[in-house]
């Protein structure tokens, strides 16, 4: 039996740790209404993010629609499953359905093509509560982050994990030394799921768990890239640096780029030049590794890339914040711009039925000028988002205001009382008196009403007085507009 699944909390009040975040989620659920922002619950794995979302649904009596990393999360799938669920009522009569996008920061690649944009579209049109779950907040698309409120889950303290482990041991009739439980809790790194799995692994085949029995169930702790860079700049010995380089869960070419970026904090020009020289030699070894598929060369690259910069840093430490390589940010910006242009071209081509090559060469510039001249109308017609509208008008603030107004207008349209509908109704009532008499003054074909009154004129001389009274606003003209389409349609097809 999977202890982590069996002892998974069912209510928000049963979740261990992150009390502030749990209260924020509970308040959001109690006060939720249509138009309220979704939540992004983020934090390291195993600390209760998904559990909290499901527990909220149980507390509120909501149904759940969940899409996680094991599902194919393409645009079509998201629109079919989550999109339909976000705009329809629950089939069980609970009134609400909670839509959960688990591991939302891992939507990428061909299997999830268009998924991020589809999630943003679902959020904008949803009439149901939505929760997105992510390990890395900044791994989410910026357009999604802008539409949501955030709730951070932090690692659970070891002293909070121990009582829960003791409760599980009691339920499973396993005697467990407090030292063993404390060791499991400390080794878990704040991950409750890992702690429970470690306890289950250590308790296999025994009814009494001692401290010496938990060494095989420790969490696999790997050195992070941040620890490696700190060790380089604070003068760790060569053996430690090589061990850290082996333990970091990244390839040498990725590690090299992180180290290169950290060298910007080295002030001495000569030392910085020496560090880049050793990094360039390491880069040549990495290139040969990929070309020849001879991975033994990686150990030489790893030695050069950590020892050379460590000599250049001279143990002075790193005062600046450790950041990802700048080239990654530029590449990400380039990919975002390319995706933005591709999305814009797709919308324009689909709406105006123009092939892509013709749109790029002949029509894009005049369309861009038309959109810049009347951004609100074109944003409404083409369903542009903030980034797409900003692409045309070059004004981030104005684009945000226009999209905000349009979003408000669309929410009002769902309720049936938009300004657009009100103006349309006024136009109809103003033009109605003019349209009624014009429908009887067609010279091509005699109207039906005079033919009906022509026969009584010969039979009864008093009839003309009745005709004059009935030609004024009587119920008869109101019913006459119905045959007008029939006559015009009949005339249209008479020639065939």
Image: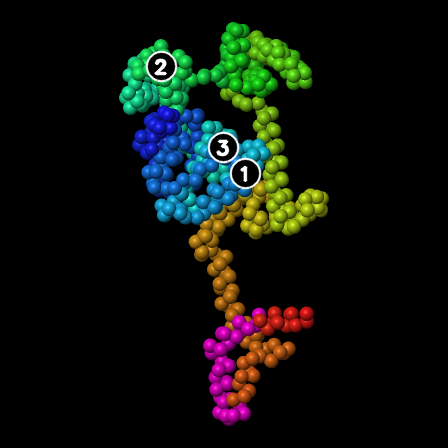
The disc placed on residue 446 is: none
Residue where numbered disc 2 is placed:
183
Residue where numbered disc 1 is placed:
74
Distance of mark 1 from mark 3, alpha carbons?
Answer: 12 Å
Quarter assignment of residue 186: top left
Q: Position of residue 193 (x, y in %)?
A: 39, 24
Q: Are marks 3 and 2 in contact (CB under 8 Å)?
A: no
Distance of mark 3 from mark 2, alpha carbons?
Answer: 33 Å
Front-most of residues 132 and 220: 220
- For disc 1, the neighbor class at 10 Å (few under 14, some 14 to 19, many from 20) is many
Per the image, label 1 sits on a secondary structure element best described as loop
In which quadrant is the C terminus drawn? bottom right
Quarter assignment of residue 214: top left
- For disc 2, the neighbor class at 10 Å (few under 14, some 14 to 19, many from 20) is some
Per the image, label 3 sits on a secondary structure element best described as loop
* Residue at image point 64% right, 77% down: 444
Q: Are marks 2 and 1 in contact (CB under 8 Å)?
A: no
Q: Is residue 442 left or right of residue 186?
A: right
* Residue at image point 47% right, 53% down: 413
Q: Position of residue 29 (x, y in %)?
A: 36, 39
* Residue at image point 50% right, 44% down: 80
Nearer mark to the viewer, of 3 and 2: 3
* Residue at image point 42% right, 17% down: 219
Whether 349 is drawn above or below 280: the answer is below
The magenta segment is: 457-485
Q: Are marks 1 and 3 in contact (CB under 8 Å)?
A: no
In which quadrant is the N terminus drawn? top left
Nearer mark to the viewer, of 1 and 3: 3
Residue where numbered disc 3 is placed:
70
Dot placed on the residue nearer the N-terminal end, 2 or 1? 1
Front-most of residues 92 and 337: 92
């Amino acid at each position: 039996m999977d202890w982590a699944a069996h002892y998974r909390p069912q209510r928000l009040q049963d979740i261990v740790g992150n009390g502030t975040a749990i209260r924020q989620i509970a308040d959001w659920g109690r006060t939720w209404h249509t138009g309220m922002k979704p939540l992004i619950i983020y934090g390291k794995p195993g600390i209760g993010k998904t559990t909290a979302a499901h527990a909220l649904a149980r507390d509120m009596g909501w149904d759940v629609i969940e899409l996680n990393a094991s599902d194919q999360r393409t645009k079509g799938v998201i629109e079919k499953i989550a999109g339909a669920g976000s705009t329809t009522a629950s089939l069980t009569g609970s009134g609400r359905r909670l839509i959960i996008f688990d591991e939302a920061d891992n939507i990428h690649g061909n299997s999830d093509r268009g998924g991020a944009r589809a999630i943003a579209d679902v959020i904008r049109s949803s009439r149901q509560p939505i929760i997105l779950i992510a390990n890395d907040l900044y791994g989410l698309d910026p357009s999604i982050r802008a539409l949501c409120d955030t709730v951070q889950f932090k690692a659970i303290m070891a002293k909070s994990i121990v009582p829960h482990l003791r409760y599980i041991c009691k339920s499973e009739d396993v005697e467990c030394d407090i030292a063993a439980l404390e060791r499991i809790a400390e080794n878990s790194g704040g991950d409750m799921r890992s702690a429970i799995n470690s306890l289950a692994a250590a308790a296999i085949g025994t009814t009494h768990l001692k401290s010496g029995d938990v060494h095989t169930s420790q969490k696999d702790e790997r050195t992070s890239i941040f620890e490696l860079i700190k060790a380089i700049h604070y003068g760790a010995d060569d053996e430690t640096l090589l061990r850290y380089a082996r333990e970091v869960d990244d390839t040498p070419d990725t590690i090299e780029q992180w180290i290169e970026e950290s060298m910007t904090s080295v002030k001495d020009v000569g030392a910085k030049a020496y560090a880049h020289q050793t990094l360039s030699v390491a880069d040549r070894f990495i290139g040969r590794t990929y070309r020849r598929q001879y991975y033994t060369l990686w150990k030489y690259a790893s030695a050069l890339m950590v020892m050379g910069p460590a000599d250049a840093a001279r143990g002075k430490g790193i005062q600046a914040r450790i950041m990802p390589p700048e080239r990654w940010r530029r590449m990400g910006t380039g990919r975002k711009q390319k995706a933005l242009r591709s999305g814009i071209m797709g919308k324009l081509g689909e709406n105006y039925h123009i092939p892509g090559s013709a749109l790029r060469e002949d029509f894009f510039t005049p369309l861009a000028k038309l959109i810049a001249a009347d951004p609100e109308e074109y944003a409404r017609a083409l369903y542009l988002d903030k980034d797409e509208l900003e692409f045309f008008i070059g004004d981030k603030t104005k684009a945000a205001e226009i999209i905000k107004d349009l979003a408000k207008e669309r929410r009002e349209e769902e309720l049936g009382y938009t300004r657009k509908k009100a103006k349309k109704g006024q136009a109809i009532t103003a033009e109605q008196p003019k349209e009624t008499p014009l429908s009887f003054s067609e010279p091509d074909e005699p109207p039906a009403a005079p033919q009906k009154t022509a026969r009584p004129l010969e039979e009864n001389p008093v009839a003309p007085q009745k005709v004059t009274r009935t030609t004024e606003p009587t119920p008869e003209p109101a019913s006459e507009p119905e045959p007008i389409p029939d006559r015009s349609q009949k005339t249209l097809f008479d020639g065939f």
